[in-house]
Amino acid sequence: MSTLVQDGQDDEGVRQGGSMLWIAVRISLLFIILCGIVYPLVSTGLAQLLFPRQANGSLLKDKGGNVVGSELIGQSFTDPSFFQGRVSSIDYKAEASGSNNYGPSNPDLLARTKETIAKWQQDNPDVPVDRLPIALITNSGSGLDPHITPQSALVQIPRIAKLTGMSAAELTSLVDAYTEDRDLGVFGDKRVNVLKLNLALKEKLGK
């Protein structure tokens, strides 16, 4: 092969390599613009237009218009005159979603469960332990569950009635009003959003 032919092939290879590199750069820039700018802007815009409340965190406000939390994330209620949610080993910190994932024989889990039951007996002397729903002494998988079962709310009524002066019938009606049905009527279980329920209770008490 002559030097002239060899040089021609080398030049062609350089041109092809440069052309392919430029194609790759243009494709990369195109996908950066589409996926990194256009898609987020479009999806955010549609979410704000069609589902503004959900897109902004499903926030709940008190009667004064102050944001008190999200209906998607549980929170601790230290005041015994309010309904209590599920146990959360992460104290409902959304940035640390999860649980300790202890096995049933783990001594730390047993100790925490006994402590929770003892606290229940102290705060709810009128309700025997055998009526304590397991949902009130166990973590959810995320540690952020904002819901409890209707039964978990109803067993707290004697304590709340005694502390607030409201009748058991009033409190039962309140729980019934805030009991959410199964999704599409068949999926999941009936549930009560603790924050929504406590906001309604707070309004009833005029707090």
Image (spheres, rainbow, N blue to C red):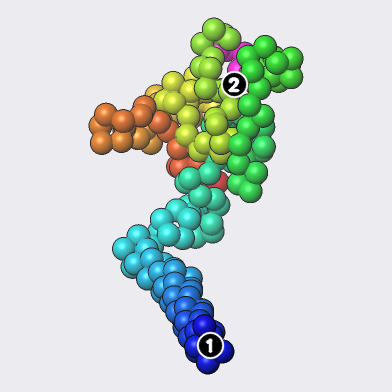
Which residue is rendered at x = 42% and y = 25% of the image? Answer: 150
Given the image, on which type of amino acid does mark 2 rest?
Answer: Ile
Residue 189, can we see it?
A: yes
Sooner in the amino-acid sequence: mark 2 or mark 1:
1
Q: Nearer the viewer, residue 36 or 174?
A: 36
Q: Which residue is mark 2?
A: 137
Q: Residue furthest front?
A: 1
Describe the element under mark 2 as helix, strand or loop.
Answer: loop
Question: What amino acid type should be assigned to the residue bearing mark 1?
Answer: Ser
Q: Quadrant of residue 141?
A: top right
Q: Secondary structure at mark 1?
A: loop
What predominant SS class does the magenta segment belong to?
A: loop
Q: Position of residue 169 (x, y in %)?
A: 39, 24
Please indicate whether residue 119 sits to the left or right of residue 140 in the image: right
Q: Which residue is mark 1?
A: 2
Vertical order, 98 against 52 (above or below): above
Q: Along the line of sight, which residue is nearer the eye, 14 or 41?
A: 14
Q: CA distance from mark 2 to mark 1?
A: 86 Å
Which residue extends farthest bottom? 4
Specify the quadrant of the image occupied by residue 23: bottom left
